[in-house]
Image (cartoon, rainbow, N blue to C red):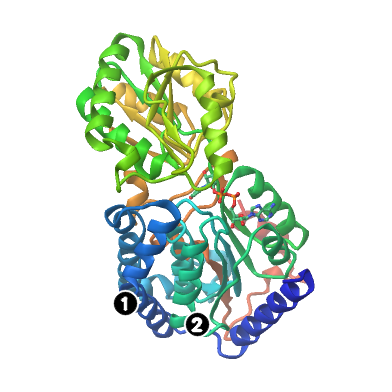
Amino acid sequence: MSIESIERNIQRLIQKQNEFFFTKQPKSVDYRIQLLYRLRAVLIENEQQIMNALQKDLNKSEFEAYATEVGILLKEISFITKRLKNWAKPQRSKTPVTHVGSSSYVIPEPYGVVLIIAPWNYPFLLAFSPLIGAIAAGNTAIVKPSELTPNVSSVIQSLVEQAFEEEQVAVVQGGIKESQVLLQQRVDYIFFTGSVAVGKVVMSEAAKKLIPVTLELGGKSPCIVHQDANLDLAAKRIAFGKFTNAGQTCIAPDYLLVQSSVKEAFIEKLTASIKELYEDVFHNPNYVKIVNERHFDRLVSYLDDGLIIFGGQSDKEKRIIEPTILDQVDMNSPVMTEEIFGPIFPIIEFQDINESICIIQQKEKPLALYLFSENEAVQKEVTTKLSFGGGCINDTLMHIATPYLPFGGVGESGIGSYHGEYSFSTFSHYKSVLKQTTKVDLPFRYPTFKHGLTLLKKLLK
Ligand code: NAD
């Protein structure tokens, strides 16, 4: 398609959604709940198609596809629809003595047309999860799924067409070109999930029109194993967190910091857990492949950045890389300066917890952080001294799967957050209204009031 026809189509969609928003504003909460129920029905009816597409693009097993994509969406819809009426109500606020006679309230209102740009690693979840929040808050939306998972993107388009009219929600498929055309348009909110580099492009485009953004980005998320950790459980939970989706998870542990005194024992347990959870990955239908050749080559090049102490084999045709542990890595090598986003796990050892804190502080603020320790003082030290988007003590990944915690980054790992009520507030503008009485008109605000200054000094301190 020529750039002109891409542009025309996108502008037509935005105009249609704008008209819809202003004439039949999707503000009624019952209407939004109906839309979310429709989406839920379509997700359930098409479950097999979704699974097939995830299998084709990423070799995701049905179990992994349900646990990490479809199931989470269904849960999010039921969580939000149960509570939406309450969140969407105007909220009364206090009124200070200076405003006596008036009342104050805050009305959550939708922004309007929301643009959602999604990545490929959880291609289904990360397109629909923000969409659920956008609809719940009463917005219309245009979703741009990733071009790197084309089967999933077609299913996303088909499901959206089954569930919604295009003035409510529309899908624009394509890659950088389409994304850039979308970013040049006047929309009311941009929700982007993807890399730090593209996040910067999105923010600078949004800044030209002062469009508010949420940026869900990535980076290097550390995982610390302290000597007093329950090493058996740590090994299992870290292996799961690192190698689920073959490490192509934004919050996967990127690198491991392990205390020297338990390094050998821990590596032994970690390799045992990997063998138990991900055996014979070249013939294992439950092990995810690398999304494309470019990422495969990038990952394989990291294997030269350290000493391979486990794994290291790969199959370019199948795009599979074994879970791999790297020791003796240089902090300045690419595997320690770039986001890995694959099944390669470098190990760094530290002597005491402060040393591990210093190592992390020298890097950008991570999206996630994981600490394995039984010691509460150590837990407090790490969670107060380090800034990170979110994380777990004695687990990996699980903080993303609760609707009660906001999910998002800080610093280079992102701006804003979502999930559960946080999704509703992300996609809502909280409009303040002061309703003044007309029964009295206190005179002290007017310049003609005799002792105005004296009274103001008493009231405003
Ligand atoms: P990406 O930034 O390459 O692409 C994301 C989206 O942006 C895609 O839809 C793509 O078409 C579009 N895009 C790419 N280049 C663009 C450009 N120059 N201008 C405009 N749009 C452009 O990211 P990806 O490779 O799809 O995903 C992997 C990255 O996403 C990793 O860094 C990972 O950590 C991050 N991620 C973050 C989260 C999170 O929730 N914080 C979740 C998943 C992935």
Question: In this rendering, does residue 406 appear at all?
Answer: no
**In the image, which disc is placed on residue 27?**
2
Amino acid type for the residue under numbered disc 2 = Lys
Helix, strand or loop status at disc 2:
loop
Left or right relative to 293: residue 136: left
Say which amino acid is labelled 1.
Glu
Q: Is the residue 275 above or below the residue 400 in the image?
A: above
Is the residue marked by circle 2 packed among few (<14), some (14-19), or many (20+) residues within 10 Å?
A: some
Task: Looking at the picture, tell me which residue is in the foreground, 122 or 219.
Answer: 122
Q: Is residue 121 left or right of residue 301?
A: left
Up the image or down, 126 lies above or below 20; here it is above
Is the residue marked 2 within 8 Å of ligand 1, measured from its CB? no
Outermost residue, bottom direction? 23
Residue receiving disc 1: 45
Mark 1 surroundings within 10 Å by alpha-carbon count, few (fewer than 14), some (14 through 19), many (20 or more): few
Horizontal arrangement in the rendering, residue 77 relative to residue 107 (left or right): left
Name the quadrant containing residue 284: top left
Please state if 161 lies on the left or on the right of 15 as rendered. Answer: left
Count the marks: 2
Please tell me the numbered disc located at residue 23.
Answer: none
Q: Position of residue 297 (x, y in %)?
A: 56, 35
Quadrant in which the N terminus is drawn: bottom right
Instruction: Find residue 336 and report its horizontal and vertical position in percent.
Output: 54, 24
Q: Residue at x 37, y 51 (%)?
A: 405
Q: Quadrant of residue 287?
A: top left
Q: Earlier in the sequence, mark 1 or mark 2?
A: 2
